[in-house]
Every structure is written in C-alpha cells, then in structure tokens.
Image (spheres, rainbow, N blue to C red):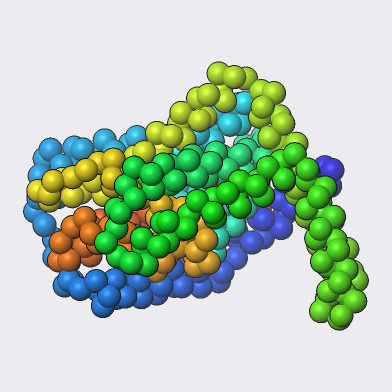
Amino acid sequence: MQQDEKTRSEEEGRFLGRPSAWVLSAVLFVGLTAVGFTAVSAIFGGTIPSFDNRLVQPQTVAAILGFLIVYFLADGLRLYFVLRTIGARIRVHEIFPLVFINILVSNVTPLATGGGFAQVWYLRRHGVAVGASAAATTIRTVLAMLLIFIAAPLFQFLYPNASSEGVARITTQSLSGIILIYLAGFLIVLFRPFWIAALLSRVLAFATRIGLIGKQRRIRWTAAVQRETQEFSASFARFARGSRMFALAAVLATLLFLLTLFAFPALLLEALGQEVDWLKVIGTLSVVTFLMYFAPTPGGAGFAELAFAGFMAAQMEADELLLVVFAWRFLTIYIGMAIGVIVSFFAFRPKALAG
C-alpha cells in the first residue's frame, strides 16, 4: 500500500512539474475562453463590454472584497474540516495556498482531474498520507455536488420558467432525471462498489474478445476501478464515523462557499443598478455550476460563458451580459488563477520538487 502511494505521488509530481503541459493547457484555456465570449456575443447580442465605473464605487469594492474573502476562506475551510473529520492532521494556514493551487490547476486541466493531483501532491508534502488526501479531496468535491444536486431541482420547483431561452428551459427541466441517475450511481459506488468493478470487468472482457483492448490493459483498468471505488466507499465510511462537529463544519463551509459563488452575479447586477431577485440568481447559478461538471474543456472554458449567458440572459440587458459574464469569471476564477500562478511557482519549483 505504501509503495502504491509512493508511486502515485511520484507520477503526480512528474505531471505537475512538466512546463510544456502547463503552457499548452494555459493556451487552450485562454483560447477556449475567447471562443466562449465570442459565441456569447454572436448568439445573445451586445457589444464588447466597456468598464462601468459603478463597479468601482467604494461600497461596491468593499462588498466584492468581502465576498472574495468569504469565498476563498470557505473554500479552504471545507477541505480542512473534511481532513479533520477523517483524522488527518494539518494546520489551517497550510491549507490556504492549496486553495489557489487547486483553482489554477483544475482550470487548466479537463474535467478538473489535475486539481485532484495537485491537492494530493501538496498535502503529502505537508504530512498527509496519499490515501487520506485522495479521500478528503474526493469527499470535499462530492459534498459540493450533493448540495448542488439539492439546489438545482429546488430551483426548478420555485422558478419553473426562470429562463426565457428555449434550450436553457428544456435543459433545466431535464435536470431532475440527470440528478437521479447521478445519485443512483453515487449510492451504488458508496454501498456496493464491487458492482461497478464487476460490471466494468464484463465490459472490458467483451472489449478484449473483440480486439478493442489488450488483456494486460483490461486487467490494469479493472484493478484501478476496483481500487478507486473501494477507496471511495471506505473514505466515506471514515467520514461518517468521524467527528460530528468537524463533519457539520465541513458541510456548512461548503454551503457558504457555494452561496458566495452563486451570489456573485447578483452582487454585480445590483451594483449596475438592476432590480435583483437574489434567490433566482443563486438558483440559476446552481444549475450552471451543475452543468459545468460535464464540461470536457479545461475549467469549463468556453462552456461556462455560454451556459451562464444562456441561463442569465433573461435577467439582464444584452449590453450588460458580456460585462457581467466577464466580471463573474474574473472574480471567481481569474483572480484565483493569477494568485495560483505565484503560489505554484514556489510550490512546484525544482528545488521544492526535489525536497
């Protein structure tokens, strides 16, 4: 087990230490983001956003700074409390650099997989075992997903006709079925992880018989899925048996993090002088965030801008749409990524990797 953890950590370190991969991913992120904004402008109208002085009024700046502090603080604390719940020991101040490393890496890797690698690697260097790190980061992500899965259908019930865009309305109405499928899969992995391994083994065996994959690859993939599903189930069991106080704190920190994330557009719209239904905006963003879990692009670049515009277009003027989309991404993603570049430079520099 210790050898497996060491091997996995070494692979993650090599992945995170490749400058060419970072540059390529960053270029892809920027390019897809530009494509997303161009598509929003073409589909929903509006002009290239000009800066609005109302966004830098003292009271607006104070509110934005307050939101950012809560947003980053809650993001760090939700992982810290999960770690404490499963018995891992780490100091609070050691968690917060990881907030920005995770924002950077998860937004330049497809489906946020690199974010998990970065977190496990970082936590291992601060004395947390690879198994505990992988469990904690997985639980932290699943807690957020479960809360979003509750918020999205609740929003459907409260605002069945929130979006005037046909595609957005149909997508929203289809969420209940998707959520039920996800929850069913989650419960199977949690309580019957061997079912997943058995099913995949049959699928891969068939693929081997018809020549799609080799026997060694089938064995390797089957073992990997069996190991990961069992670790996932075991980690949640540890979380359920852990401190009730820390577990509750993890849930509350996750809720606060998501509420702040979802409320940013409402804050921006209010600063621009619009009448804002905060609950409606928060619900809309819960749906957008849910859909971003399926985005294959790094950090949801391109997809995030289009999804946001599709669901929020009915709640603002076309000329303000691009400005709000950019400001939302700037505050919740771009600032964190910029800080993450600086933090990662020191964390991933050759001297650190060799240490």
Q: In this rendered view, identify the residue nearer to me: 216 or 56.
A: 216
Residue at point 47%, 35% (across, down): 254
Residue at point 18%, 50% (across, down): 269
Residue 351 in view, yes or no:
no
| Residue 25 shown left or right of residue 195 in the figure | left
The quarter of the image holding the N terminus is top right
Quarter of the rendering containing residue 205 = bottom right
Image coordinates for residue 129, horizontal then vertical, percent? 71, 37
Q: In this rendered view, identify the residue nearer to me: 196 or 342.
A: 196
Image coordinates for residue 212, horizontal then vertical, percent? 81, 79
Counting labels gives 0
Q: Is residue 186 above or below residue 242?
A: below
| Residue 234 shown left or right of residue 53 in the figure | right
Residue at point 44%, 72% (across, down): 27
Residue at point 59%, 19% (across, down): 244
Image coordinates for residue 166, horizontal then vertical, percent? 33, 67
Quarter of the rendering containing residue 48 = bottom left
